Protein backbone atom coordinates (compact mmCIF):
# COMPACT_ATOMS: atom_id res chain seq x y z
CA UNK A 1 0.00 0.00 0.00
CA UNK A 2 1.36 3.45 -0.92
CA UNK A 3 0.28 6.90 0.14
CA UNK A 4 1.85 10.09 -1.22
CA UNK A 5 4.60 7.97 -2.77
CA UNK A 6 5.57 6.41 0.58
CA UNK A 7 5.12 2.79 1.54
CA UNK A 8 2.93 2.46 4.62
CA UNK A 9 3.83 -1.18 5.30
CA UNK A 10 6.15 -3.91 4.11
CA UNK A 11 5.81 -7.71 3.80
CA UNK A 12 8.40 -9.23 6.13
CA UNK A 13 9.60 -12.59 7.43
CA UNK A 14 11.80 -13.82 10.26
CA UNK A 15 15.07 -15.55 9.40
CA UNK A 16 17.84 -16.86 11.67
CA UNK A 17 20.51 -14.24 12.36
CA UNK A 18 23.26 -16.74 13.04
CA UNK A 19 23.79 -14.91 16.33
CA UNK A 20 21.22 -16.80 18.40
CA UNK A 21 18.18 -14.75 17.35
CA UNK A 22 16.44 -13.70 14.18
CA UNK A 23 16.29 -10.81 11.73
CA UNK A 24 13.11 -9.25 10.36
CA UNK A 25 13.65 -9.19 6.59
CA UNK A 26 11.96 -8.24 3.33
CA UNK A 27 12.64 -10.17 0.12
CA UNK A 28 14.14 -7.71 -2.37
CA UNK A 29 15.21 -10.12 -5.14
CA UNK A 30 14.47 -13.69 -6.18
CA UNK A 31 17.78 -15.26 -7.21
CA UNK A 32 16.35 -18.59 -8.38
CA UNK A 33 17.06 -22.09 -7.05
CA UNK A 34 15.16 -21.18 -3.83
CA UNK A 35 17.66 -18.41 -3.02
CA UNK A 36 16.58 -14.84 -2.25
CA UNK A 37 18.28 -11.56 -1.43
CA UNK A 38 16.77 -9.94 1.69
CA UNK A 39 16.91 -6.55 3.38
CA UNK A 40 16.99 -6.32 7.18
CA UNK A 41 14.41 -4.06 8.85
CA UNK A 42 15.81 -2.91 12.19
CA UNK A 43 14.17 0.07 13.85
CA UNK A 44 10.66 1.16 14.73
CA UNK A 45 7.55 2.65 13.21
CA UNK A 46 6.82 6.24 14.27
CA UNK A 47 4.12 8.78 13.39
CA UNK A 48 6.60 10.35 10.93
CA UNK A 49 7.62 7.02 9.37
CA UNK A 50 10.31 4.40 9.84
CA UNK A 51 13.08 5.29 12.32
CA UNK A 52 16.11 3.24 11.26
CA UNK A 53 18.47 2.00 13.94
CA UNK A 54 21.97 2.12 12.57
CA UNK A 55 24.08 -0.99 12.33
CA UNK A 56 21.65 -3.53 10.87
CA UNK A 57 18.83 -1.59 9.19
CA UNK A 58 19.22 -1.87 5.42
CA UNK A 59 21.81 -4.68 5.56
CA UNK A 60 21.32 -7.11 2.64
CA UNK A 61 22.31 -10.73 2.30
CA UNK A 62 21.37 -13.93 0.47
CA UNK A 63 19.54 -16.82 2.12
CA UNK A 64 17.47 -19.88 1.27
CA UNK A 65 13.75 -19.19 0.90
CA UNK A 66 13.16 -22.13 3.30
CA UNK A 67 14.74 -20.04 6.09
CA UNK A 68 11.94 -17.45 5.89
CA UNK A 69 9.18 -17.92 8.48
CA UNK A 70 6.35 -15.93 10.08
CA UNK A 71 5.22 -13.99 6.98
CA UNK A 72 3.38 -10.81 7.94
CA UNK A 73 2.75 -7.17 7.08
CA UNK A 74 4.78 -4.73 9.18
CA UNK A 75 3.60 -1.10 9.41
CA UNK A 76 6.18 1.60 8.71
CA UNK A 77 4.05 4.30 10.36
CA UNK A 78 2.55 4.24 13.83
Image: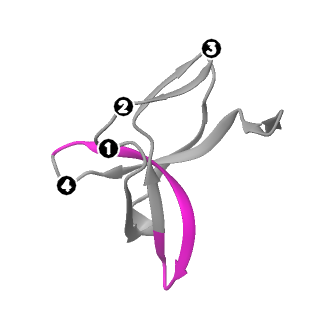
The earlier-in-sequence mark between 1 and 4 is 4
Query: Which residue position is annotated with label 1?
Result: 56
Q: Say which of marks 2 and 4 sits in front.
A: 2
Q: Secondary structure at mark 3?
A: loop
Callout 2 environment at 10 Å: few (<14), some (14 to 19), or many (20+)?
few
Query: Is mark 2 in CB contact (under 8 Å) with mark 1?
Result: yes
Q: Residues within 10 Å of mark 3 (few under 14, many from 20)?
A: few
Q: What residue is pinned by disc 4?
A: 18
Residue for badge 2: 53
Nearer-N-terminus badge (4/3): 4
Element under disc 2: loop
In percent of the image, x 56 and y 62: which residue is there?
28
- Magenta part of the protein: which range? 20-36
Question: Going from the N terminus, do you reach mark 2 or mark 3 first?
Answer: 3
Residue depth check, mark 4 versus mark 3: number of the one nearer the observer: 3
Q: Quadrant of the N terminus?
A: top right
Work out whether 76 lies above or below 58: above
Amino acid sequence: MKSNGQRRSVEVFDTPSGLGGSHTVEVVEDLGNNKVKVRVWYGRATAAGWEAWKGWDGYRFETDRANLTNKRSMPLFK
